Image (cartoon, rainbow, N blue to C red):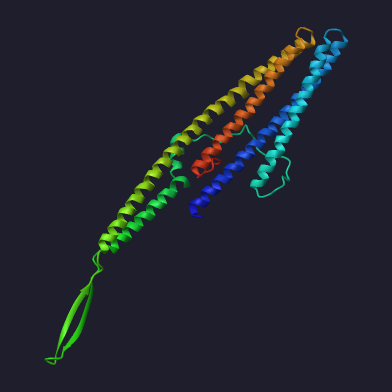
């Protein structure tokens, strides 16, 4: 495998491992959230049973609360099964057939400082995906120069002495030799070299266009998901939590039904899940940019 082939293979493995790592952190966050959801389901059941005993709630609400609690337990078990699956996949990438770790570390809410698109496009030029074509073009240029150098007329001079038997005299003779049709043969090789160089240049331009498009898309996606994450974290979720607090108070006073309380709680947890998924998507887009440019975005402002 060539040097650039090894670099590209390494980038692919690292990108795959990073994506798996992000998925695991996301699942861990969902498990933690499901535990909180289960705790609220248990509290809801206790409150509903108490209200039923007091005669201010229907038996159906108790059954509904029990079913909701069981659903949260099933959801948590499903997430833990997914966690085991992705742990094994990550362990395989590390060269192990057994996942001998419980969790992975990382903060989904911590993002790298954003670089401008112009800087990212400049970094893309240094990517092995582009540099491999540059190296091939240079090799073709060296080959062309060698062919041209060998195409120059190559005369071989010969000097000698010849004795003439009839007159008993001696004479100096001279001659030269030159390979026939060598220039014609080299002309054909040069044409093939030029065609190969043109093909490499075209492939390089196509690859560059493809990578630039992917980079622009990843950049746009990062901006969108980071904005969504900020809005969810700083506005939507705090407002929903306040609404939940007020609804809980009203429910405890008998002003709201269990279904109304459950609806608000579901809105809170749905928004929390959306926050996890959106933050994870941002990190995945960062990984794509790292893979394309061949450069890590961590500490990227350092000299």
- Picture mark count: 0
Q: Is 97 rendered above or below residue 156?
A: above
Specify the farthest residue to the front: 166
Q: Nearer the viewer, residue 12 or 38?
A: 12
Does residue 104 appear in this view?
no
Residue at left 73%, top 31%? 78
Q: Nearer the viewer, residue 290 or 134?
A: 134
Along the horizontal axis of the image, is 190 left or right of 14? left
Along the horizontal axis of the image, is 236 left or right of 151? right
| Quarter of the image where one finds residue 268 | top right
| Quarter of the image where one finds residue 280 | top right
Residue at left 66%, top 46%? 92
Q: Is 269 rendered above or below residue 3?
A: above
Q: Position of residue 196 (x, y in %)?
A: 36, 51
Q: Position of residue 33 (x, y in %)?
A: 71, 28
Does residue 192 appear in this view?
yes
Along the horizontal axis of the image, is 149 left or right of 169? right
Along the horizontal axis of the image, is 151 left or right of 169? right
| Quarter of the image where one finds residue 267 | top right
Specify the farthest residue to the left: 167
Q: Is 5 rendered above or below residue 300?
A: below
Q: Is 124 rendered above or below residue 259?
A: below
Q: Position of residue 164 (x, y in %)?
A: 15, 89
Q: Nearer the viewer, residue 224 or 233?
A: 224
Residue at left 23%, top 66%? 153
Q: Position of residue 222 (x, y in %)?
A: 53, 31
Specify the farthest residue to the right: 53
């Amino acid at each position: 495998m060539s040097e650039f082939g090894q670099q590209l293979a390494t980038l692919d493995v690292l990108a795959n491992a990073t994506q798996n790592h992000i998925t695991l952190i996301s699942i861990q966050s969902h498990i933690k959230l499901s535990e909180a959801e289960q705790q609220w389901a248990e509290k809801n059941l206790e409150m509903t049973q108490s209200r039923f005993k007091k005669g201010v709630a229907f038996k159906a609400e108790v059954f509904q609360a029990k079913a909701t609690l069981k659903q949260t337990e099933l959801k948590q078990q499903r997430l833990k099964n997914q966690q085991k699956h992705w742990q094994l996949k990550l362990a395989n990438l590390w060269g192990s057939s057994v996942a001998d770790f419980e969790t992975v570390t990382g903060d989904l809410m911590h993002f790298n400082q954003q670089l401008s698109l112009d800087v990212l496009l400049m970094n893309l030029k240094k990517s092995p995906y582009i540099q491999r074509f540059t190296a091939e073009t240079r090799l073709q240029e060296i080959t062309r120069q060698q062919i041209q150098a060998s195409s120059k007329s190559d005369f071989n001079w010969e000097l000698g002495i010849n004795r003439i038997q009839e007159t008993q005299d001696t004479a100096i003779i001279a001659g030269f030799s030159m390979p026939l049709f060598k220039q014609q043969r080299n002309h054909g090789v040069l044409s093939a070299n030029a065609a190969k160089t043109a093909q490499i240049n075209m492939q390089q331009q196509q690859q560059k266009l493809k990578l630039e498009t992917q980079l622009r898309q990843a950049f746009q996606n990062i901006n969108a998901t980071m904005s969504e994450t900020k809005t969810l974290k700083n506005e939507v979720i705090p407002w929903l939590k306040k609404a939940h607090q007020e609804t809980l108070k009203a429910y405890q006073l008998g002003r709201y039904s269990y279904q109304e309380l459950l609806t608000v709680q579901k809105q809170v947890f749905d928004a929390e899940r959306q926050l996890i998924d959106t933050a994870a998507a941002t990190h995945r887009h960062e990984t794509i940019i790292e893979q394309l440019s061949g450069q890590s975005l961590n500490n990227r402002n350092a000299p």
